[in-house]
Image (cartoon, rainbow, N blue to C red):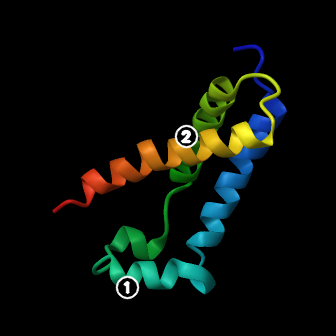
């Protein structure tokens, strides 16, 4: 595990966190998402507690560390693209597919 570039892991986790924030911003897709996801609960109207953001960042760190372990040292751009697309399609998309079957 020591071959993981922890600086790259921190940058990756920060990028994931920032992109998520931008994605759900009211001027991007946030307002549309809220309208489509059913009536808002009181919690959603007030916003998330700070703990939600801390845990989300920790989860992004875990994912980035695991991706670094899977890629290995000095993977090159094409290996990163192929592994990223493979993991995204084979694990993430299929998991979403299972969840949305109903």
Question: Residue visible at 60% across and 29% down?
Answer: 66
| Residue 10 in sight in this render | yes
| Residue 57 in sight in this render | no
Question: Residue visible at 63% across and 65% down?
Answer: 21
Residue 57 x %, y %: 61, 45
Q: Is residue 57 left or right of residue 37?
A: right
Image quadrant for the N terminus? Answer: top right
Q: Is residue 15 left or right of residue 20?
A: right
Regarding mark 2 in the picture, which secondary structure is present there? helix
Residue nearer the viewer, 8 or 54:
8
Residue 59 is marked as 2
Residue 95 x %, y %: 34, 47
Q: Which residue is mark 1?
A: 35
Residue 96 x %, y %: 35, 54
Mark with earlier residue (1, 2) = 1
| Separation of residues labelled 1 and 2 (CA atoms) | 26 Å
Residue nearer the viewer, 62 or 92:
92
């Amino acid at each position: 595990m020591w071959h993981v570039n922890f600086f790259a892991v921190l940058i990756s986790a920060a990028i994931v966190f920032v992109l998520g924030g931008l994605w759900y911003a009211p001027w991007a897709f946030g307002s549309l998402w809220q309208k489509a996801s059913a009536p808002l609960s009181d919690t959603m109207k007030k916003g998330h507690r700070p703990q939600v953001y801390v845990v989300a960042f920790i989860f992004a760190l875990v994912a980035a560390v695991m991706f670094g372990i899977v890629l290995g040292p000095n993977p090159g751009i094409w290996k990163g693209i192929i592994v990223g697309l493979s993991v995204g399609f084979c694990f993430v998309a299929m998991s979403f597919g299972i969840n949305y079957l109903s």
